[in-house]
Amino acid sequence: MQKFAVFISGNGSNLQAIIDSVANGEIKAELSLVISSTDKAFGLKRAEKAGIKTLVFSPDNYTNRQSVDRDIVIALKEHKIDFLVLAGYMRLLTPYFIKEYPNKIINVHPSLLPSFKGAHGIKDAFTYGVKQTGVTVHFVNEKMDNGPIILQDTVKINEEDTLETLEAKIHRVEHRIYPQAVVLMADQRLKVKGRRVTILEKPEVKAENSQ
Ligand code: GAR
């Protein structure tokens, strides 16, 4: 079984959806580690309640981004982590980190990428006045909110919507589609070619003794 880690910085509601999905057997992989960029993240309490090991790597204790990432990578290797799930982790990973886990890091973003990148995807879409926004799950590359797209789903913005009602709608969609993407990672059913991601019916079997 594959092992994975979830990265958080805050509430951890997506982490909770993933914990629940592991518990009910949909995600067939072991959630071995939750990593947070701050000890204030409520998500740490969710992880502890579920009996999952937590580690905090606060940037305040480091002089540069790469040294934070280097220590995180050491911890990931120690725990033999196969893939990484960013869930509201509000830090940009260094190229060094991403090269260690090519096509093994996924992220959820609360807009239809490539629109409304950044830390305020829901608010920016609401303020812009779009009639539809949504949720994107994508692989992580060196650029922010830029990697190949795995899943997307739309959310309509109606006249009656406020920022708060829109946030609630977006989170509902996130909690539905992010665990689905983790299932695809766990089952090794994602194939990346350039910017295109194909969902395979079955995992690719690597030929043994192929020369
Ligand atoms: C989620 O809405 C996620 O899409 C967003 O942070 C929130 C975390 O909520 N991520 C980004 O904006 C990344 N650019 P959670 O801590 O309750 O899962």
Image (cartoon, grey):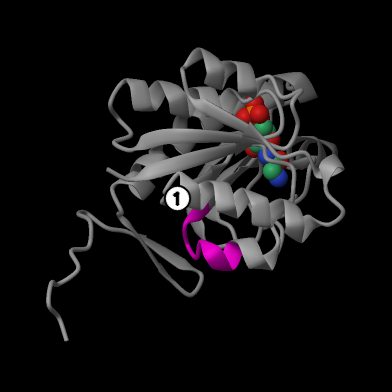
Pinpoint residue 123: horizontal percent, then vertical percent.
Answer: 80, 35
Pinpoint residue 118: horizontal percent, then vertical percent.
Answer: 77, 49
Dot 1: within a 10 Å radius of its alpha carbon, few (fewer than 14), some, or many (20 or more) residues?
A: many
Q: Which residue shows up at 74% across the image and 26% down it? A: 39
In this rendered view, identify the residue nearer to me: 70 or 171.
70
In this rendered view, identify the residue nearer to me: 162 or 16.
16
Asked whether, in this view, residue 205 is left or right of residue 189, the answer is left
> Is 111 part of what is drawn in magenta?
no
In this rendered view, identify the residue nearer to me: 162 or 184.
184
Pinpoint residue 70: horizontal percent, then vertical percent.
Answer: 66, 57
Is residue 137 visible in this depiction of the protein? no
In this rendered view, identify the residue nearer to me: 74 or 125.
74
Q: Is residue 133 above or below residue 106?
A: above
The residue labelled by disc 1 is 83
Quadrant of the image where one finds ligand 1: top right
- Queried on whether the Cβ of the residue with tag 1 lies below 8 angstroms from ligand 1, the answer reads no
> Is 99 part of what is drawn in magenta?
yes
Looking at this rendering, what residue extends furthest in the top direction? 49
Asked whether, in this view, residue 208 is left or right of residue 86, the answer is left
Q: Which residue shows up at 28% across the image and 47% down it? A: 187
Q: Which residue shows up at 66% across the image and 44% down it? A: 111
Which structural element holds mark 1?
Answer: strand
Is residue 106 visible in this depiction of the protein? yes
What range of the chain is rendered magenta? 98-105
Asked whether, in this view, residue 207 is left or right of residue 125, the answer is left
* Quarter of the rendering occupied by the N terminus: top left
Pinpoint residue 114: horizontal percent, then vertical percent.
Answer: 67, 58
Q: Which residue shows up at 33% across the image and 38% down it? A: 29
Looking at this rendering, what residue extends furthest in the bottom direction? 211
* Quarter of the rendering occupied by the C terminus: bottom left
Please name the amino acid that badge 1 sits on.
Answer: Phe
